[in-house]
Image (spheres, rainbow, N blue to C red):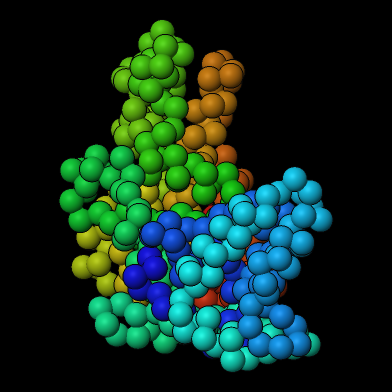
Amino acid sequence: MKTYVAFEANENNIHEILLFFNSSITKEGKLLNYKPFIFAGITKVKHLTYEVIPGFLKFIAIHEILSEKDADLKYDDVCKFYRNVLVSLPPEWVHFINENINPVSKNYEINADCFSFSVEDKEVPMPQSTRTFYNLLIQLVGKSPVSESYWIEKYPELELSKCCIFSNLYILPGECRELIFQVLHRTLFTKVKLLKCNMSDNDTCSVCAQSREDLEHMFINCVNLSQFTDFLKDFLLNFMCNVDDNFVNTLDFDQAMLMGFLKRSNGFNFYFANFIMSIARFSIYKRKNFILLNPQAKLNLVDYFKTLLEKYISHYFYLLNQRKEHFLLENILYWTIPLSK
Ligand SMILES: [Zn+2]
C-alpha cells in the first residue's frame, strides 16, 4: 500500500516520527529495530535530538541513556547502531534537525493531514480516502471466498459482495447474520457435510427423511417446506402490490431463500424484504434443529415464523425509531398487517 501513500514530513511533525519499523527509515532496504533503544524509550526522532540547541545528541549521550537500562551494553555496539539510524534518516530530515530546535514545549501530533493518498497519479481528497484506501487494500490483498465459484456457477449474475450489504445490516438479529454468513460461505453443517466429516452415519434430511440434505434441500427443496414456501410467497407478494410487475417477475425466490433479494426497484422495500427472508431462513434452520432434538415433536413452521417475525419487528421498530432511521420503517406497519390476519 505504501506506493499509494505519501507522508509529508514538516516542521510540525518531524520530531514525532517513529524510528523503528518505519518504511521511511531503512538500512539497505530493511526496517530498523533495535531493542535496547526501544527499552530505553528512544523511539522517536525527537529522542535523538537536543532540547535547547539544534542537532543530534552525541554518541556518548545515547550510550549513557541506554546504559541506565542495561549496564553491560558496549559503547561500540551502541555507536554502530546509532550511526545506522543517522545514515538511514532521509537527508532532508537530518538537515532540518541540524537547523531547528526540537519544539519540546509544543505537543505536536502526526495526524491525517500529513498523509496524502493517490491512485493512478490522481490525489484522492482526504474525506474520500478511507473508503478508497480500504477498497484498494481489499483488491490488493483480498482473496475471494472459496464458495464464490460454486455460487457463480449456480447464479452467474451473483455478486457476493452485494449480499454482504444486507447480510451485515445491523437491523438483522445476530443469529440471522451468522446464519446467512454460513450459507454464503457454505459452512453450515448440513447432513451432507456432517457425513463427510464422519459426524453422522447418513446424509438424509431429518425433516422429510426422503432426500440428501444439502443447503438447497434444507432451504428450498425439502417437501416439508412447500406449505411454508407458498405462505411466504403470498406474504411477500402482498407487500409488492405497488411494485412494477416486470420487476417482481424477475425476482428469484429460491435464490432469495438462500442469500436474500439482490435487486432493487422503486416501491420495493429492499431492506425489509431481506429482513423477512432472513427471519424465514432462520425459522427453517431452527425448526430443523428442533426436529433433530425431538424427532416426535410437531412444530408448525408458518406459526413459528410469524412468532419470530413479530418478536423481531417489535424489537427493531423500537431500535429504528430510536435511531431515527425511518426509511427502514416506512412500510413496517403496512407490512405487518397481513401477519395479523
Ligand atoms: Zn427434507
Res. 97 visible in picture: yes
At horizontal 72% and vertical 54% (from top left) the residue drawn is 39
Q: Does residue 77 appear to the left or right of 302 in the view shown?
A: right
Q: Work out whether 217 lies above or below 120.
A: above
Q: Quadrant of the N terminus?
A: bottom left
At horizontal 52% and vertical 58% (from top left) the residue drawn is 32
Q: Position of residue 164 (x, y in %)?
A: 41, 56
Q: Does residue 46 appear to the left or right of 270 in the view shown?
A: right
How many numbered marks appear?
0
Residue nearest the viewer, comparing 328 with 18:
18
Residue 55 image-quadrant placement: bottom right
Residue at the outermost top position: 201
Residue nearest the viewer, comparing 305 with 149:
149
At horizontal 77% and vertical 55% (from top left) the residue drawn is 67
Q: Position of residue 33 (x, y in %)?
A: 56, 55
Res. 209 visible in picture: no
Q: Quadrant of the C terminus?
A: bottom right
Q: Position of residue 279 (x, y in %)?
A: 51, 48
At horizontal 22% and vertical 47% (from top left) the residue drawn is 152
Residue nearest the viewer, comparing 268 with 82:
82
Q: Position of residue 29 (x, y in %)?
A: 38, 59
Q: Work out whether 291 lies above or below 118.
A: above
Q: Does residue 180 appear to the left or right of 145 in the view shown?
A: right
Q: Work out whether 318 lies above or below 203.
A: below
Residue 250 image-quadrant placement: bottom left
Q: Work out whether 300 lies above or below 178.
A: above
Residue at the outermost right position: 68
